């Protein structure tokens, strides 16, 4: 295409422009990579070495910091808590969200717009601002310091965008498929489960990533509701860890590496899906 | 109503109600409860008398809330301004550069997006370490032979907020970049090619063709920036602490709201009434600022 910036065959001025662009992008990539690399390097160094020679590479690959942080400082538990709390929340976000999307997109009835708007209102409302009534509510239901409180909130957080994105996809499923299934004697549930859901499967990946990443990373609600270390998630565990060992640089960098590296590895294999999923709400 | 209609209604209810119940109880009910609670006086978690807008009056006109509130609001405004100016401009630049398919653009695209995946907490703590007086950034400046530029990045009132904003930009700039990239990729290529064949300059093509056609994505990013700026919390919590140190210079509505709700600004016990009033203000600001920018930018939208 004539609009692309190709180096080969370009005039001198254009070559200069392209070199400048490449330089900007390479520098920015270094700005992303170096802080992360330094974090991992530092996790293999002693606190003294980190302060004395911050740019030096580690002299040995000693994993004892990782063992300490993972086993003795409870990061194994925090990690496990984050995994299952995110997992359970996402299962319900996907089930209830896809059901609701089906309910508002595949039937014609008077209240359908209202129901849809009720779900959508959740997208714009900052849920953090409602922490006081939420806290009183959870206290009344005796759910404070019970993971169920956070799971309920995460499900509610995920539903609006799930209904928004999935109902868009479900509207596009041809009605003829549904008629054919009905003639074959399928119930409404079977049509949802066997016809519509398989067709919108790619969109399910999209909403899974769109919601799982913010839920995995969420800090505010676990901070408020999960106080005992038995239930702490990774971000909250990281916080109390930083409060306790604020001068043990070596352990702090290890804790950060444990929080960051698994996400990085997952991204390495699924970058395309992460990018499409996370920008799904903003890109049409 | 026929039997068939009744069955249809039953199916609709079955599909919609589980999700709707959760959204109603966890999102909508607390919104109304915030409004309701803000009109009462409170003793700890017990609701006392109806006092009208007295809680709002205290937030806006009475010390110590007045100073704290407007100080925090000013910082949220700074967040919005600097994020729009630096992050979203940079995002537009990156998006545009990547759309021109320079060598390695797929790789750059993926790398720029990496920090977007990380939790604000991890990013905040990591950069909190790097920005300490004896941290990596100051060591780097010393290495460059410019120790005169060394600063207490998070300890100096005049730059602490900006430091935290820049860290947040480091984390998030990949998001607007790729949203703008997707929007620019959607601009029909024949428009661009025709302009080039007519000998239009790069800057003219960008201003006259690309920019007007990506207004919808500018609207989306602006609204997300408004919502994000009004909800800044984790960034301050991890890099400056709940009090917005030093000396409240990094305090935001989010941290002020948290301190009020869970251990008060002046007494040490929760202030449910004042806290609810601040919560309602956050709702209101988010709502009206979003509506305003949607309608303002909506006028600039054009159709091909």
Image (cartoon, rainbow, N blue to C red):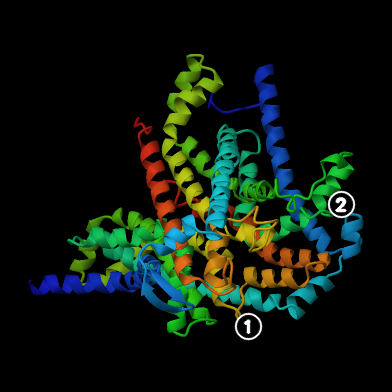
- Counting residues from the start of the chain, the first of labels 2 and 1 encountered is 2
Callout 1: helix, strand or loop?
loop
Would residue A204 be visible to someone looking at this image? no
Q: Which residue appears at 61% of the width and 44% of the height?
A: B109
Indicate whether B208 appears above or below B57: above
Tell me the CA gap for discs 2 and 1. Answer: 37 Å
Locate residue B259: give its quadrant. Answer: bottom right
Left or right of residue A252: residue B87: left
Locate residue B83: give its quadrant. Answer: top right
Mark 1, residue position:
A230
Mark 2, residue position:
A55
Q: For the residues tagged 2 and 1, is the chain the same?
A: yes
Q: Residues within 10 Å of mark 2 (few under 14, many from 20)?
A: some
- x, y percent for residue A278: 51, 54
Indicate whether B20 appears above or below B166: below
Q: Which residue appears at 40% of the width and 54% of the height?
A: B284
- Chain to which the residue tagged by mark 2 belongs: A
């Amino acid at each position: 295409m004539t609009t692309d910036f190709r180096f080969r065959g370009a005039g001198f001025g254009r070559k200069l422009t392209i070199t400048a662009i490449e330089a900007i992008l390479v520098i920015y990539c270094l700005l992303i990579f170096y802080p992360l690399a330094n974090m991992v390097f530092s996790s293999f160094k002693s606190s003294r070495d980190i302060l004395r020679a911050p740019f030096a590479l580690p002299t040995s690959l000693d994993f004892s910091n990782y063992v300490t942080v993972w086993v003795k400082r409870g990061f194994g538990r925090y990690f496990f808590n984050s995994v299952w709390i995110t997992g359970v929340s996402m299962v319900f976000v996907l089930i209830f969200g896809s059901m609701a999307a089906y309910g508002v997109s595949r039937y014609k009835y008077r209240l359908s717009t209202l129901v849809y708007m009720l779900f959508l209102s959740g997208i714009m409302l900052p849920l953090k601002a409602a922490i006081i009534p939420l806290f009183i509510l959870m206290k009344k239901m005796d759910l404070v310091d019970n993971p169920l409180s956070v799971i309920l909130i995460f499900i509610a957080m995920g539903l609006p965008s799930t209904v928004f994105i999935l109902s868009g996809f479900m509207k596009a499923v041809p009605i003829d498929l549904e008629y054919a299934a009905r003639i074959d004697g399928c119930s409404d549930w079977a049509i949802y489960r066997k016809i519509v859901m398989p067709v919108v499967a790619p969109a399910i990946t999209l909403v899974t990533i769109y919601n799982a990443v913010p839920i995995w990373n969420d800090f505010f609600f676990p901070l408020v509701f999960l106080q005992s270390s038995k239930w702490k998630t990774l971000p909250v565990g990281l916080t109390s860890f930083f409060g306790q060992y604020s001068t043990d640089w070596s352990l702090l960098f290890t804790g950060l590496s444990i929080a960051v590296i698994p996400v990085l590895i997952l991204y390495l294999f699924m970058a395309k899906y992460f990018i499409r999923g996370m920008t799904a709400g903003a890109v049409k | 109503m026929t039997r068939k209609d009744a069955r249809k209604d039953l199916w609709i209810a079955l599909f919609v109600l589980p999700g709707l119940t959760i959204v109603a109880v966890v999102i909508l009910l607390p919104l109304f409860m915030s409004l309701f609670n803000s009109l009462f006086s409170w003793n700890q978690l017990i609701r006392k008398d109806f006092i009208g807008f007295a809680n709002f009056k205290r937030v806006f006109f009475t010390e110590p809330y007045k100073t704290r509130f407007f100080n925090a609001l000013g910082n949220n405004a700074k967040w919005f301004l600097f994020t729009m100016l630096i992050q979203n401009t940079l995002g537009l630049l990156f998006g545009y550069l990547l759309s021109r398919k320079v060598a390695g653009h797929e790789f750059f695209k993926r790398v720029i997006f990496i920090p977007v995946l990380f939790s604000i907490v991890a990013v905040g703590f990591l950069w909190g370490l790097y920005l300490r007086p004896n941290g990596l950034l100051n060591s780097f400046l010393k290495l460059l032979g410019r120790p005169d530029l060394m600063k207490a990045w998070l300890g100096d009132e005049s730059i602490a907020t900006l430091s935290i904003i820049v860290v947040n930009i480091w984390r998030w700039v990949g998001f607007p970049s790729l949203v703008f990239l997707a929007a620019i990729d959607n601009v029909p290529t024949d428009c661009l090619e025709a302009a080039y064949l007519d000998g239009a300059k790069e800057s003219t093509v960008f201003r006259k063709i690309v920019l007007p056609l990506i207004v919808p994505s500018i609207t989306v990013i602006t609204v997300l920036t408004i919502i994000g700026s009004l909800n800044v919390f984790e960034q301050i919590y991890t890099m400056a602490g709940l009090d917005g140190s030093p000396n409240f210079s990094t305090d935001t509505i989010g941290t002020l709201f948290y301190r009020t709700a869970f251990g008060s600004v002046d007494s040490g016990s929760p202030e449910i009434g004042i806290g609810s009033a601040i919560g309602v203000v956050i709702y209101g600001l988010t709502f009206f600022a979003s509506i305003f920018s949607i309608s303002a930018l909506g006028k600039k939208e054009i159709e091909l």
